[in-house]
């Protein structure tokens, strides 16, 4: 098959295991997480990394979350136009073009229009925790927090409940979902002291309780005997709690869990909690919700809830990674496949052998050897620097630049 871009020296085939895909999906963001020495010849800025579909004719949208040239560590998100649960999906990674003038990333278009916020929690401080969607729902304020801690996917933010730590995102129209929603986050929860009932806001809370401006929230409760994970949506100001829960024996402390809350559309809402990709049985199953989600003008908080405006409470203790909000109710299949790609990327996909473009540029250069010049072809495939040793054992080092 012809190469999509003959400026690129290498490519690899990526095979997505269809058995890890719960149902056919459209415009689905998969996680690429590898450390590959073959990638170390790429640019330090990662401009010369890009992805193509199986025909190698359509470039795929991607976002690089982390790129370390020295080791070839790559964390990236790639939008797959059509992801099959019947047959394996094939895509390609193209890499190494030293003179690539344009960043190949397109982060906002990795995420479909139903994502209203995607936070990778990657920044070195609160001001660097930015929304990957076009909605720009960036973190605008914080209290404490420890940044760039080892997370489930990349970095995570560590919240200490004893110091009342949290992040806040300013209210915006895109966060005012009023019918259906999906709330996602990875949580590494530290254990509470038992014996008393304790609540904690988890990854997503647009909630001012005493002010009756409750919009949506996902939180946890520990009674000392068990832990319940709850999702709320207030409806039209009607304080009727819809909750789903799981027991403590299904929720281990001090380990990573994917927690996803889904508020479905329509009347008599029955909310759902997904723990590690699986839907938990709602409890109690008869409790229903008002027809709409209340549209609150309060900020969104990560790691706590709000009581009165400006007064935070119910603080979370632990780490949080990969926080997302959608303005639709994602399906069971979507949530299960999301868990599979994030939880274990190495089993979700496999990488083929490195292929080298036969038409990629080569360069001629010359260097002295015993006072005579000999011509050697330098192949840009391997590296931009090389060492050659003459017969007397002296090294000559050259830097090759494309003309």
Image (tube, helix red, strand yellow):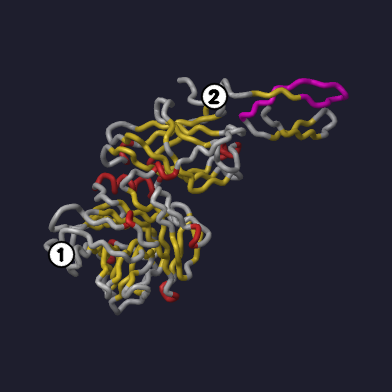
Q: Residues within 10 Å of mark 2 (few under 14, many from 20)?
A: some
Q: Farthest residue toward the left? A: 286
Q: What x and y, as percent, mark residue 84?
A: 30, 34
Q: What x and y, as percent, mark residue 337?
A: 31, 45
Q: Quadrant of residue 221?
A: bottom left
The residue that disc 1 covers is 284
Q: Quadrant of residue 321?
A: bottom left
How many labels were placed on the picture? 2
Q: What x and y, as percent, mark residue 175?
A: 32, 57
**Dominant SS type (magenta):** strand
Query: What is the CA distance from the residue labelled 2 to the residue labelled 1?
Result: 60 Å
- Could you tell me if residue 25 is visible in this image? yes
Residue 6 is labelled as 2
Point out the stretch of residues depicted in magenta.
Answer: 366-381
- Work out which quarter of the rendered image holds the N terminus and state it: top left
Query: Viewer-nearest of labels 2 and 1?
Result: 2
N-term-proximal mark, 2 vs 1: 2
**Residue situated in front as seen by the camera: 221 or 126:** 126
């Amino acid at each position: 098959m012809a190469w999509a871009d003959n400026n690129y020296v290498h490519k690899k085939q990526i095979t997505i295991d269809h058995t890890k895909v719960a149902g056919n999906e459209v415009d689905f963001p998969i996680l690429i997480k590898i450390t590959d020495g073959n990638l170390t010849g790429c640019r330090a800025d990662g401009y010369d990394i890009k992805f193509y579909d199986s025909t190698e004719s359509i470039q795929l949208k991607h976002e690089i979350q982390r790129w370390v040239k020295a080791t070839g560590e790559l964390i990236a998100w790639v939008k797959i136009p059509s992801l099959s649960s019947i047959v394996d999906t094939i895509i390609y990674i193209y890499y190494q073009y030293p003179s690539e003038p344009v960043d190949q990333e397109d982060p906002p278009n990795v995420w479909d229009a139903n994502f209203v916020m995607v936070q990778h929690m990657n920044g070195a401080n609160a001001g660097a925790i930015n929304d990957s969607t076009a909605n720009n729902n960036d973190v605008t304020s914080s209290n404490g927090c420890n940044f760039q801690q080892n997370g489930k996917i990349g970095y995570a933010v560590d919240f200490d409940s004893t110091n009342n730590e949290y992040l806040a995102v300013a209210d915006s129209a895109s966060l005012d979902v009023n019918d259906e929603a999906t709330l996602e986050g990875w949580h590494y929860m530290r254990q509470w002291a038992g014996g008393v009932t304790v609540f904690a806001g988890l990854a997503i809370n647009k909630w001012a309780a005493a002010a009756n401006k409750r919009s949506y929230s996902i939180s946890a409760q520990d009674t000392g005997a068990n832990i319940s994970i709850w999702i709320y949506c207030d409806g039209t100001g009607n304080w009727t709690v819809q909750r789903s829960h799981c027991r403590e024996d299904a929720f281990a402390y001090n380990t990573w869990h994917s927690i996803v809350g889904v508020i479905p559309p329509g009347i008599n809402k029955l909310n759902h909690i997904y723990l590690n990709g699986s839907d938990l049985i709602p409890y109690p199953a008869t409790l229903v919700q008002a027809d709409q989600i209340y549209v609150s003008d309060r900020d969104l908080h990560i790691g706590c809830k709000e009581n009165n405006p400006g007064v935070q409470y119910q603080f979370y203790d632990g780490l949080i990674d990969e926080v997302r909000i959608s303005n639709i109710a994602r399906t069971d299949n979507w949530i299960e496949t999301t868990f599979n790609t994030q939880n274990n990327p190495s089993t979700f996909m496999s990488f083929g052998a490195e292929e080298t473009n036969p038409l990629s540029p080569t360069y001629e250069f010359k260097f002295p050897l015993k006072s005579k010049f000999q011509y050697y072809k330098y192949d840009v495939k391997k590296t931009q620097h090389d060492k050659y040793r003459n017969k007397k054992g002296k090294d000559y080092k050259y830097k090759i630049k494309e003309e």
